[in-house]
Amino acid sequence: MPTVISDTDFLSSFLKIGRLDLVREFCQVETLWIPPWVYREVAETELLTRLAEVPWIRIAAPDADILNDLLRDEDFRDLGAGAQESIALALGRAEAVLMISDNKARKIASRLGVVAIHIPAFLLACKVTGLVNREALEAIVQDLRNKDYYEFRPDVLGALLS
């Protein structure tokens, strides 16, 4: 069973649309881990109440040595603190999967050996496995657009809704 970690953007997107349950169901995990900085970023928004209502989210600090080693990487230093802590936390956990929306952060995480999944890939995996059908995906895409201002590239949207 993987350790699933979320960055701020991914977490807030699914909190906004009320579908964080998909992460738990798809990954078949009992806990979604977030680092302290991600909690701080969400706590500064109106999503704090929604976050507090999800009892299976836990906060864990990344290993300080791992984070300090990563901070030697110039590209890594350019990331936000939430992305930095999320990547460091993933590197410190066996079989970790990082849910992260920021493309630059996702690429850096992948370069460092972290399995990093963004929203389109996650939704496509949910579709392929039959967790959500086309109708449910349409609703999720619409909710992401309306509540989170998230836009999909036309080719990605076509793959999701075909």
Image: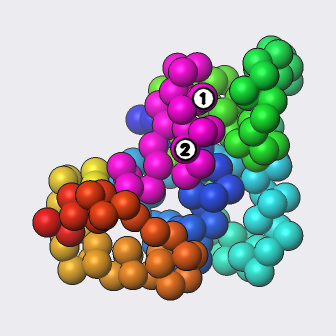
On screen, residue 2 above or below 53? above
Image-quadrant location for residue 120: bottom left
Which residue appears at 50% of the width and 84% of the height? 146
Which residue appears at 47% of the width and 78% of the height? 145
Between disc 1 and disc 2, whose residue precedes? Answer: 2
Q: Which residues are magenta?
A: 101-122
Q: Secondary structure at mark 2?
A: helix
Q: In the shown orientation, is residue 30 left or right of residue 34?
A: left
Is residue 117 shown in magenta?
Answer: yes
Q: In the shown orientation, is residue 137 left or right of residue 56?
A: left
Percent position of residue 39, x then y: 78, 57
Amino acid type of the residue tagged 1 in the rendering: Ile
Q: Quadrant of the C terminus?
A: bottom left
Percent position of residue 134, x then y: 19, 73
Q: Which residue is mark 2?
A: 103
Q: In the shown orientation, is residue 22 left or right of residue 85?
A: left
What's the distance in space between the residues labelled 1 and 2, CA to CA?
9 Å
Is residue 89 shown in magenta?
Answer: no
Q: Quadrant of the N terminus?
A: top left
Which coloring applies here?
rainbow
Q: Which residue is mark 1?
A: 108
On screen, residue 75 above or below 80? above
Q: Residue furthest front?
A: 154
Residue 1 visible within the image? yes
Which residue appears at 72% of the width and 27% of the height? 75
Residue 62 visible within the image? no
Image-quadrant location for residue 161: bottom left
Q: Secondary structure at mark 1?
A: helix
Which residue appears at 73% of the width and 28% of the height? 76
